[in-house]
Image (cartoon, rainbow, N blue to C red):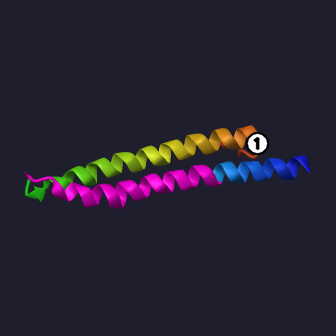
């Protein structure tokens, strides 16, 4: 029973972090882009809102990937399901 409880806790924590990061992705992709249209301006021929949204969203996406990798590596090691590096 202890192994089953441990795996259930592992998957619950994985699901929680995945849903939270997907929510952040949704906010950055759709909500911020929608409200950024109110920004006026021109940046090298592109609307300022497009430029800020495109550059800012890439930074956030890289942050999401970095955080997920670090979190899951730590969680895998905590529950003993990590893969050894082959390097």
Q: Residue at 12% of width from left, 58% of height from top?
A: 46
Instruction: Quarter of the image for the C terminus: give it.
Output: top right
Please state the extent of the stretch shown in magenta in the rendering.
Answer: 15-42
Across and down, in percent, residue 9 comes to 75, 48
38 left or right of 29? left
Q: Residue at 16% of width from left, 56% of height from top?
A: 38
Count every numbered label the image shows and give the total: 1
85 left or right of 1? left
Across and down, in percent, residue 6 comes to 81, 47
13 left or right of 24? right
Q: Residue at 65% of width from left, 51% of height from top?
A: 14
Across and down, in percent, residue 40 comes to 10, 53
Q: Secondary structure at mark 1?
A: helix
Q: Residues within 10 Å of mark 1 (few under 14, many from 20)?
A: few
Magenta part mainly helix, strand or loop? helix
Residue 63, quarter of picture: top left
Check the image and report above or below for 84 versus 33.
Answer: above
Q: Nearer the viewer, residue 62 or 30?
A: 30
Q: Nearer the viewer, residue 76 or 31?
A: 31
Q: Is residue 87 visible?
A: no
Task: Please tell me whether residue 35 belongs to the stretch shown in magenta.
Answer: yes
Task: Please tell me whether residue 26 belongs to the stretch shown in magenta.
Answer: yes
Which residue lies under the disc numbered 1? 79
27 left or right of 5? left
Q: Residue at 34% of width from left, 61% of height from top?
A: 30
Q: Is residue 23 visible?
A: yes
């Amino acid at each position: 029973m202890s192994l089953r409880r441990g795996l259930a806790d592992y998957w619950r924590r994985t699901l929680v972090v995945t849903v939270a990061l997907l929510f952040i992705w949704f906010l950055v992709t759709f909500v911020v882009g929608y409200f950024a249209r109110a920004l006026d301006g021109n940046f090298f021929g592109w609307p300022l809102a497009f430029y800020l949204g495109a550059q800012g969203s890439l930074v956030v996406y890289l942050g999401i990937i970095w955080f997920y990798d670090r979190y899951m590596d730590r969680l895998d090691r905590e529950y003993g399901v990590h893969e050894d590096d082959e390097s």
